[in-house]
Image: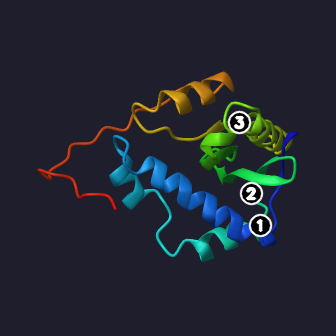
Amino acid sequence: MESARRATAEDAPTIVELYREGLAELRPNRGGDLWSRREARPEPCDVDIAEHLVGAEDRLALLGLIDDAPVGYALARFEALHDGETLLVVSDLYVQPDARGVGVGEALMDQLVAAASDRGAVGIDSFVLPGDRHSKNFFEAHGLKARAILVHRSLVADPPEVD
């Protein structure tokens, strides 16, 4: 049975492992190298993820499960806008490749939407790397649409190789 639940401090090692899997998957994609050096968590990421799980009111951490086995996670934060409204910003949403397409991502998104609605947020933001049609389609199926496009010009002839 696919489900999602609030993550606890005890889930930190599992989420760190899932985070690193997701990072390795995204890094080789178009835009992934620079994203991994700018927007992704710096290593060691353990402390940052553990701090996200301690229950601050502006943070949300979820664990996606099949039966009782963790196969995905989501991390988000509530951000205050200039006009006093709130936006839920999803920084991470990852499901292991073998567990995709069975409802784990949907369970995570359902809880994110419910949490945003409960807090009276005006919307939900996340990101998708260019060319990642699967993620774009997933978010669009849950009502998220592009509202900005980030453009970039590389000044490096050959991007660094990814390990």
The residue where tag 3 is placed is: 122
Neighbourhood count class around disc 3 (C-alpha, 10 Å): few under 14, some 14–19, many 20 upward? few
> CB under 8 Å between callouts 2 and 1?
yes
Left-right relation of 133 to 54? left
Q: Which numbered disc, 2 or 1, marks the residue closer to the eye?
A: 1
- Give me the disc on residue 61: 2
Local secondary structure at mark 2:
strand
Q: Looking at the rendering, which quadrant does residue 108 occupy?
A: top right
Q: Looking at the rendering, which quadrant does residue 115 occupy?
A: top right
The residue where tag 1 is placed is: 11
Q: Is residue 116 above or below residue 47?
A: above
Q: Is residue 150 above or below residue 56?
A: above
> Looking at numbered disc 2 in the image, what kind of residue is underneath it?
Ala
| Residue 119 position in % (x across, y down) | 82, 45
Task: Tell me what residue is drawn at x 62 percent, y 64 percent.
Answer: 17
User: How far apart are labels 3 and 2 at the CA level?
Assistant: 19 Å
Neighbourhood count class around disc 1 (C-alpha, 10 Å): few under 14, some 14–19, many 20 upward? some
| Residue 52 position in % (x across, y down) | 69, 66
Q: Earlier in the sequence, mark 3 or mark 2?
A: 2
Task: Tell me what residue is drawn at x 21 percent, y 43 percent.
Answer: 153
Task: Tell me what residue is drawn at x 73 percent, y 59 percent.
Answer: 58
> CB under 8 Å between callouts 1 and 3?
no
Q: Which numbered disc, 1 or 3, marks the residue closer to the eye?
A: 1
Q: Is residue 161 above or below residue 119?
A: below
Q: Is residue 26 above or below residue 55?
A: above
